């Protein structure tokens, strides 16, 4: 009966099979689930739902922290279970259904979903499913490898289902810091003033009467799929390290740089890992997802503390970290994504935000989400929460893609997620553009000279010069502004001739 | 010698002519000046600078709170004084110079300028000129009708020039609340938790040794030029009032709505004035600029308290308010724009942000700044500070302009200032689109059905339907997406045939 995991005895009779628990979820419901970047997602119950959806009409609105592992979003999309999905996803099959208009996807700043539920701007979940490592004597829920939106989704739901994961040790208890901002009006400030501060509880407070079911789960989290660093990502890291060194030298950054936020994915992870060989010490992170690079930096003695909302590791690194967790635990905290990404905290701490761009334009507007301006890749995630409020908002990308058919720097982005007001530094393997304090025409010159691949530099210079002839604060040739994307779509290369 | 205005006797020998004070400013300097939306700008010294610039090489980088009155930006631009200008302007002559590429204009979120200076991301002013109603016994500066960036620009400058305005009574003292966030790291939370709270000083703290000159000024602020309400703005106000009433009825807003922020300009002012005849009482404002409508609401007994960064009134209303200031003073506070617009405070208080759009697209992206995607109108101002962090981010505009040649709703905005993630409600005289919790395809349907002028509805519906055929989260026909703007430019009407 796993009494050491379910420490409130009166809940023991709530243990049931995943199928029984899933039967609490009805067609048309809004369902909350734990899960952030493949960490700590509910698994047993969603798989049971997929099975049910193959037999009966069952469509739900699904709200999670962020993306899910175990191909859950794929299975749920393909079974027809998902009518609506928010606030983030990263699955090819779900992406296909979203772009076909079959699943309504609400792409949100990750700090905002639960805030909007709190003030009833968004519908609250009828039922929420959370993966946990334990339930305390008080009936409170100890999450597993992510917090995400779990605490708030549990708070707002009428019923809660807990999946007790036997794959994570109960020694994860103490890792989490659950702080929930009170309702407005007269909400007090969030008291967090340093990355290592604990301001909440180690478990999700909940009236145990709302725990409707407990499922014992043997499922594992999916390992992260970050690619190893390559010459381009190493070059990006080197440009950034050189920039940071210059900032420190001129007194614009402290010697430990200040709290770092690093987006999910191979490029950002490689940039972070590049700091292992940098001169900077006593680093700290105030980020969303802690990846392999966080633990590389711990092991190298470079990193003092890391605050995040999820721990997402490769298979090897995951076995090592969770197999020797006491070694790291005192230097880690996982917070609700509302707090890890909160504008109030990001601005107060003065984080350095490093996120990946899909493309950016000569004025520094960034597209993080839409391929060709129309087709969703993953979602904006936390990049907007961080870029807007960071002390330094940095976006990185390789200068070209698809063997050079695509330039990541274009005349005008086909979709805007971050406006030029929110973008300070752009980096490709070609170089770094420091846009601080520059007007758009100056930004264009710095971006073209530093970030663009040589194969595209002349074309962009020509576009910019012709646009300046027409004038404007942000010169453009509207009839050509999106022609690179149209070329790519019709002719397979951004610079293909008619 | 105006000893009642300059209460620190040791400063009396700093009184000099505007020309003498202006001589402290050298070619190439970065200069800070008070002034926000035509309120409380320095005037005597900038006019003296304009005079100097007609005789000698003199180019400066000018940083203010926001736009200036007395055609100061026009005179400074036309004299060639301005090499660089930030963070906002609203002058036709300066606009022309900006769009010609003659003045480098850095268009910023108004809460961010001094934050970027604090962390040395932006160059600090060499010298700052501030209009004041008095200097205290401690040598601290009591601003006039705006705070804007004055406190911080004074803090960061090596030298400060004070213009003592004899046009405002010294009874403005006590109106202001100067709070300056400490430097990072370990900055405490901003303690503000309600609109009427005072958290700082009534004057700008400064070492009086840095006051290099004092100029006695007889200049007046320019009156605001808001247009009276018309049938369209009244219709917009009515749509909003109906929406608010429904939100209150369903428990999503409190009976007093919560703190209101209202952008500068005729449409926003008319919407606010429309609340005089609404059922809502005990209203409060947490805004940037307090316009005539604020005082109409006070006089109607509807408004309890208004917090802003500037008071900008028409000639008649200004004479009445400042002639009878004690009547209003206890219900008013002016704060630094960093605080009036701060993400931390806007999010905590859960403001309702109402701002004017230049155009928006069928997915709810908003252009606030660039005519035809290229030519700067005024700047983003505080709209981004508020829209991102508001409980409800509302944008208003008339559905057509230029006798119908322009639709304010377009297939794709030609420039993005606010992305769909940050826009909850759109209102034109045609109706109101409630976009909360909707995916882009759903947003398009609601916007087209509710906000578009009948003359453009069929064309937009057709565009949307054809785009959906191609698929995507945000369907577009890239080759037609900007064609309405191109048509307008080439043929004088957005729907003109070839």
Image (tube, coloured by chain):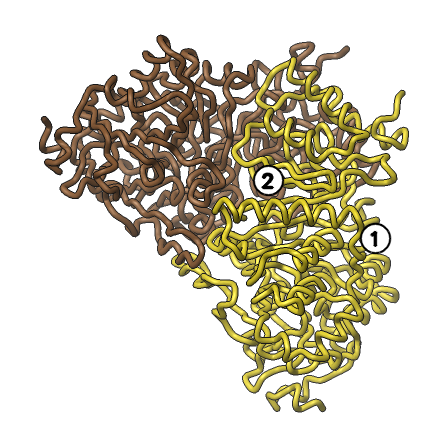
Chain colours: A brown, B yellow
Residue B356 in percent (x, y) is at 70, 47
Look at mark 1 in the image and give the residue it sits on: B92
Name above or below for residue A163 compared with residue B285. Answer: above
Count neighbours of disc 1 (C-alpha within 10 A) and say few if under 14, some if 14 to 19, many if 20 or more.
Answer: some
Q: Would you say residue A459 is visible in this rendering?
A: no
Which tag, 1 or 2, sits closer to the chain's start?
Answer: 1
What residue is rendered at 28% in x and 31% in y? A130
What residue is rendered at 57% in x and 33% in y? A431
Q: Quadrant of the N terminus of chain B?
A: bottom right
**Foreground pick, B251 / B16:** B251
In this picture, residue A276 sits left or right of residue B196: left
For residue A193, which quarter of the picture?
Answer: bottom left
Residue A80 in percent (x, y) is at 43, 13
For residue A302, which quarter of the picture?
Answer: top left
Residue B388 in percent (x, y) is at 55, 45
For residue B210, which quarter of the picture?
Answer: bottom right
Q: Chain of mark 1?
A: B
Residue A355 in percent (x, y) is at 48, 34
Q: CA distance from mark 1 to mark 2?
A: 28 Å
Look at mark 2 in the image and give the residue it sits on: B423
């Amino acid at each position: 009966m796993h009494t050491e995991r379910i420490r409130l005895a009166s809940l023991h009779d709530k243990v049931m099979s995943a199928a029984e628990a899933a039967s609490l979820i009805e067609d048309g419901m809004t369902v909350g689930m734990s899960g952030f970047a493949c960490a700590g997602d509910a698994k047993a119950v969603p798989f049971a739902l997929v099975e049910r959806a193959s037999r009966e009409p069952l469509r739900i609105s699904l709200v999670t922290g962020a993306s899910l592992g175990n191909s859950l979003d794929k299975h749920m999309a393909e079974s027809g279970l998902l009518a609506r999905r928010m606030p983030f996803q990263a699955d090819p099959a779900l992406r296909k259904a979203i772009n076909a208009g079959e699943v309504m996807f609400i792409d949100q700043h990750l700090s905002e979903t639960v805030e909007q539920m709190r003030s009833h701007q968004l519908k609250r979940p009828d039922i929420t499913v959370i993966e946990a490592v334990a339930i305390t004597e008080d009936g409170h829920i100890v999450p597993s490898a992510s917090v995400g939106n779990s605490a708030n989704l549990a708070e707002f739901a009428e019923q809660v289902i807990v999946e007790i994961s036997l794959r994570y040790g109960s020694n994860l208890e103490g890792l989490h810091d659950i702080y929930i901002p009170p309702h407005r009006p007269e909400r007090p400030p969030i008291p967090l003033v340093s990355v290592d501060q604990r301001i909440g509880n180690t478990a999700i407070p909940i009236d145990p009467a709302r725990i409707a079911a407990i499922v014992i789960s043997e499922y594992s989290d999916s390992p992260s799929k970050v690619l190893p660093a390559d010459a381009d990502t190493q070059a990006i890291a080197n440009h950034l390290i050189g920039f940071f060194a210059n900032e420190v030298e001129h007194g614009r950054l402290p010697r430990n740089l200040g709290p770092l936020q690093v987006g999910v994915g191979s490029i950002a992870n490689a940039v972070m890992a590049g700091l292992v060989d940098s001169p900077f010490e006593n680093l700290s992170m105030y980020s969303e997802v802690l990846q392999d690079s966080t633990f590389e930096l711990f092991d190298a003695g470079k990193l003092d503390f890391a605050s995040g909302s999820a721990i997402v590791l490769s298979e090897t690194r995951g076995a090592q970290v969770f197999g020797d967790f006491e070694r790291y635990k005192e230097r880690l905290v996982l917070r609700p994504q509302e707090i890890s990404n909160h504008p109030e905290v990001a601005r107060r701490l003065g984080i350095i935000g490093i996120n990946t761009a899909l493309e950016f334009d000569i004025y520094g507007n960034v597209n993080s989400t839409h391929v060709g301006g129309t087709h969703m890749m993953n979602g904006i995630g936390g990049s907007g929460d961080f870029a807007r409020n960071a002390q330094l908002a940095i976006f990185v990308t390789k200068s070209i893609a698809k063997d050079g058919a695509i330039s990541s720097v274009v005349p005008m982005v086909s979709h805007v997620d971050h406006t030029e007001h929110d973008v300070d530094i752009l980096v490709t393997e070609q170089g770094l553009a420091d846009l601080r304090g520059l007007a758009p025409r100056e930004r264009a010159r710095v971006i073209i000279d530093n970030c663009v691949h040589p194969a595209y530099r002349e074309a962009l210079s020509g576009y910019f010069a012709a646009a300046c002839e027409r004038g404007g604060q942000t010169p453009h040739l509207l009839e050509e502004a999106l022609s690179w994307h149209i070329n790519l779509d019709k002719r397979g290369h951004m610079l293909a001739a008619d």
